[in-house]
Image (spheres, grey):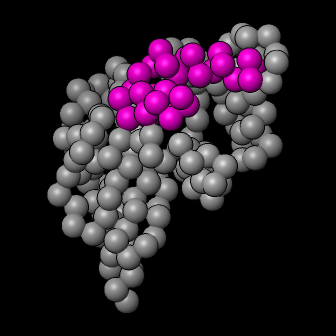
Amino acid sequence: PLSTILKAVNSWSNNLCAEVLVLSLPHKVKRKTTFKNGLDMMRSFATKHLSWSDFFLTNGSGLFGDTRVKPQQMTELLAYMHRKQDRYPEFRPSMAVAGFDGTMKGRLSNLESAQIYAKTGTLDGVSGLSGYIRMDHGDMIAFSILQNDFKTSARPIRKLQDEIVRALVEFSTDTAEK
């Protein structure tokens, strides 16, 4: 089922499954099953539903090629998926839960007023953390932190990402209390 495949992609960063999802898109609408057709469908969705204009997709996993997406665009996609969760119920539950499973099991586990659902991504010199902060007071915050061209290991970058998410939680908690 789609929910199992999405969990493999979003929670465990199974890049092969991400590529297979791109290939499966054209099949669903009776088009020739090619990466080009799958990527064209993704581009069409992003242009039509998200008003993206300045982006470049070369594959489904982001592991190779010249894929370029801005954090603002990722956040817009996440917000869209949240607004349309009745149409895409598998999406948010497919993300790793901080402190609990997937690539987020050892991260952000001791937040008292929020739960983090996120997708991580790491390559040489590139690291990303994008997802949702579900505040205990009810707010859902979409966020995306994408960093590239660093020359260190990803460990300090992930630490900085976690600090940014903690700051977002603290800010949202302070704002809700006022």
Residue 142 at least partly seen: yes
* Residue 81 against residue 157 in the figure, above or below: below
Residue 122, image x, y percentages: 36, 27
Q: Does the magenta stretch include residue 12?
A: yes
Asked whether 100 or 151 is in front, the reply is 100
Image quadrant of residue 26? Answer: top right
Q: Residue at x 44, y 46 (%)?
A: 93
**Most prominent secondary structure in the magenta stretch?**
helix
46 relative position to 21: left or right: right
Asked whether 147 or 17 is in front, the reply is 17
Q: Is residue 22 magenta?
A: yes
Residue numbers of the magenta segment: 1-28
Image quadrant of residue 154? Answer: top left
Asked whether 32 or 35 is in front, the reply is 32
Q: Residue at x 79, y 10 (%)?
A: 32
| Placement of the C terminus among the 4 image quadrants | bottom left
Image quadrant of residue 150? Answer: top left
Residue 158, image x, y percentages: 27, 39
Q: Residue furthest bottom?
A: 178
Q: Which residue lies furthest to the front in this view?
A: 1
Q: Which residue is drawn at 75% across and 47% down?
A: 49
Task: State the count of labels.
Answer: 0
Residue 160 at least partly seen: no
10 relative position to 18: left or right: left
* Residue 137 against residue 104 in the figure, above or below: below
Q: Residue at x 22, y 47 (%)?
A: 99
